[in-house]
Amino acid sequence: MLFGGTNPLYGKTLGYLTEDPQQPMVVFHLWNGTKPGAEPWPPEHEQPLLLAVRFGGGSFRESLTLTPEGERRKPTLGDPCLPQ
């Protein structure tokens, strides 16, 4: 399953299901981003970066694994993008 638009220059979420309905979906979170201080266009990366993978039926936090790139880009406390 593809979540997001069809434009290859924008981030997407891809979901993969097996033939066995008892198995959980594997979800890949991809992102292109923009350069710091740049307008929203053009994207920073020509090919999307894999930021996280989600697998399993547990809670969101338990089933999400950040990639090294996702860990590097993870917001920190005080980040203006996080709710206060």
Image (tube, rainbow, N blue to C red):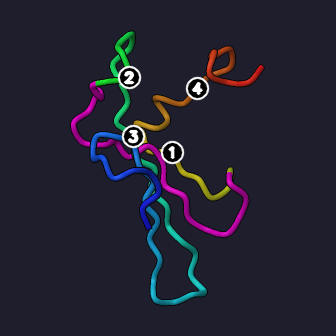
Q: Which residue is mark 4?
A: 75
Q: Which residue is mark 1?
A: 66
| Sequence order check, earlier mark of 3 and 2 | 3
Looking at the rendering, the stretch of residues picked out in magenta corresponds to 42-60
Quarter of the image holding residue 76?
top right
| Sequence order check, earlier mark of 1 and 2 | 2
Q: Which residue is mark 3?
A: 31
Q: Nearer the viewer, mark 4 or mark 3?
A: 3
Confirm whether the magenta stretch covers residue 45.
Answer: yes
* Cα distance between the residues tagged 1 and 4: 12 Å
Label 4: element kind: loop
Q: Position of residue 19 (x, y in %)?
A: 46, 89
Which numbered marker is on residue 5?
none
Check disc 3: other Cα within 10 Å, few if <14, some if 14-19, many if 20+.
many
Check disc 2: other Cα within 10 Å, few if <14, some if 14-19, many if 20+.
few
Kind of residue at badge 2: Pro
Q: Which residue is mark 2?
A: 40
Kind of residue at badge 1: Leu
* Cα distance between the residues tagged 4 and 2: 18 Å
Kind of residue at badge 3: Trp
| Sequence order check, earlier mark of 4 and 2 | 2
Please give the name of the residue rendered at 58% of the width and 26% of the height, measured from the top-left corner: 75
| Sequence order check, earlier mark of 1 and 4 | 1
